[in-house]
Structure formats: C-alpha cells, structure tokens
Amino acid sequence: MAGVALEQVNKVYPNGFRAIEDLNLDIADGEFFVLVGPSGCGKSTALRMVAGLEDISSGELRIDDRVVNDVHPKDRDIAMVFQNYALYPHMTVADNIGFALKLAKIPKAEIAERVARAAQTLDLGEQLTKKPGQLSGGQRQRVAMGRAIVRQPKAFLMDEPLSNLDAKLRVQMRAEIAGLQRDLGVTTIYVTHDQVEAMTMGDRVAVLKRGLLQQVDTPQNLYDSPDNVFVAGFIGSPSMNLMKGRIERGDHGVTVKLGSQTLGVPDSVLSERPALERFVGSDVVVGLRPEDIEDAALAPDSPADRRLHTTTSLVEALGSEIIIHFPLDVEPFEIMDQEFEGEDAVATATDETGNYIYVAKINPRSGARMHQPIELAVDTGRLHFFDPGSGLSIRQ
C-alpha cells in the first residue's frame, strides 16, 4: 500500500489545450479517493497520468514517496480497472485473473493460490472455467477486479468501472467495491462523472471542472459547505436550486428577495456567514436544496416569511418522497454552459408564462397535485449564498 501525491501537476497537449492545470492532491495510504466532475473535466486524464499512460507536462507525481514521473507504467506497482473490463475473450476467468502473474513469471502454485483466493473474495468460484462471454456484466466486472487484486499492488486506479452496468447492478457493485476496498485497505483512486457514486463510495472527493480543482473534502462537507457555486450545483441529487437574489434589510431584519417574493434570513445564518452583511443592498446567488423545502401544509409552524407561493407544474410520486417542479419569477444562475459541458450542461426549464422551474423534494404525505397552487415552507437556516462575480461561497 502507498500514498499518492500530485504537486503542481499540469497536462498540456501539443495543440495548447490544458487538460489539467496546477493539480495538487495528497491521497493517504489506504484511502478511497474519488475524482468527480462533468464530462471533459480532466478526471480520467489525471488518473492516466498516475498510471503512466499519459505524460506529465510539468509538476511532480509521487507514489509511496517515490517520484515516478518517468517510471514506466509496469514499474509503478499499480493496477488499473477500466470501464470496458478489458478481458481476454478466449481465456477462462481463471486465466484472465492470473494473466499478469503469469507474465511476471510467478510460480504456478502461487498463481493458483492467489486466483483461488481472489475468486473466493469476489464470489467467482463457480465461474473460473467459463469464458467472459458466458458471464453477466456484474461478473465480468468482478473478474476485472480480481485481476487487479491478485497483483497485490500499492494502489488501485479505477476509471468509471460501473458505467456499463444497469442501474440496479451499479448500486450493488458500488457497495461491493467499497466493501472490498475497506477489507483490502489498498489506496484507491476512483474516477466517475456520477456524483451519487462519488458521495456513497469516497472517503474524500475531489471535484474538477475544466482541468481545475474546485474542492477536496469528505462527501458530507462537500454537500453541507460547498466552496463555490459549481460544487454546490454539481453535488446533490436533485441538484441545488441556484437563483439570482438580492439581500435587503427591513424592519424585521435581513431578507433575501427572490423575484416578487421575499424570505427572511435567520440570525443563525448571519452568524455563520458574517460576510453576508457586506452584501446588504447587493445581488447574490441563492442556493436552496430541494430537500430543504417542504409542503407548508405539513409544516404548520413555519413562519410566514419562510414560505414561497407557487403552483406545481409537475408532481413525481416516488413512494418514499415526492419531487415537485414549481415556477418562480426569479432568474436562475447557470453553472455550466453548452459549449464546454455538452451533455452535462444545466438548462433550467420555463413554464408557459416564462417563469423558471425549480425543484423540491417533499414528504410523501403531501397532497400536492399537478397544476394546483401550493405553499412551500423553506428551511431558510439551510440557505447557501454565493458571490455572483467570483462564484465563491459567502462566509467569513
């Protein structure tokens, strides 16, 4: 096992495109570390530089305190698990798992022992004589994991290993990979564009955008205290509602104006975010998570200045919760654009009157119905505020 460190690492292609810019990461020995971000953000490029499959333009990469910038991939003592499994179709499961050991001229008895142990760990004991084409997607993924495990490397590198699986199997394999990593204690760097995967699997998560590191923290801290508006909008499902608002001071204290409606800002928020005082009379970006909104009929004690009046445009009953879409006459703050982010771009919808649609996640006991008026109680103590110029969280 080993720690992995990247110091001021850059990747610049011959055409001048900067895929990674001044990346600094310090990944602890035995840590499950996740790189996440939208398509094209540089996360796979960073992983491939650690693997030695991409040259580093500048900066320093260390594995187990050894500088490996110019070390050949096979000499870095790492094992990589790819998105497409990369199994040999003509070999049995046992031969696929043990192939790297055979190349390394490990004695046959030891290869058989390691393969058997990995197969037992991954519940592949009955599949060892089969070919990859006879296996399910989940089983093929386990074989790819087994091939990495038997090498007993200093670190695992995983590049979107679950993206080819269906939704139910992805959930199962998420738990299996996380549990396996905890049991083995091997340093693991895991790349995904799925923020739910990142949040449920990682000890720490690094969020990237356009080759730039946005924030590194535990999943819960990324959710509770995003450093900027991009992290706020990217982490969480459904995404945080981000809207343009204005901080004002009235007879009853500080408020935030959202279109034609106003919410009171509790003193607790001002205590946690003293810098917000500097924005009184100014525009801000207001972040409101869907789960911090409730049907006011189920929150009778909610103060009148903590409520929004709207009409449901869509009601999605999911059993354990209800997702409602509702219009407000307040402009959204866009965190991504189509030109750079492609399929990951966020485009806020509008209704027939031109109002923008936002999302709430409410109690399934709500009587919310399609196209009916509804009053929403907002947990204003959980509001997030960002500087519209820099995009940074307004805190100290």
Image: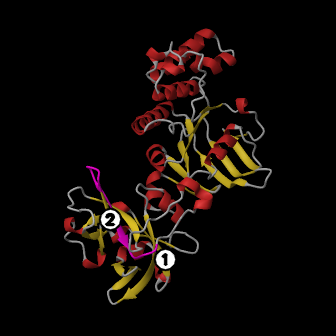
Q: Residue at x 49, y 19 (%)?
A: 134
Outermost residue on the right side: it is 14
Residue 264 lies left or right of residue 30; in this view the side is left
Q: Position of residue 92 (x, y in %)?
A: 55, 15
Magenta segment includes 386: no
Residue tagged by mark 2? 313
The magenta-colored residue range is 316-331
Q: CA distance from mark 2 to mark 1?
A: 26 Å
Answer above or below: position of 376 versus 324: below
Residue 310 lies left or right of residue 174; in this view the side is left
Number of numbered tags placed on the structure image: 2
Answer above or below: position of 167 versus 290: above
Label 2: which secondary element: loop
Give the residue type at disc 1: Val
Magenta segment includes 330: yes
Q: Nearer the viewer, residue 58 or 90?
A: 90
Q: Position of residue 212 (x, y in %)?
A: 64, 57
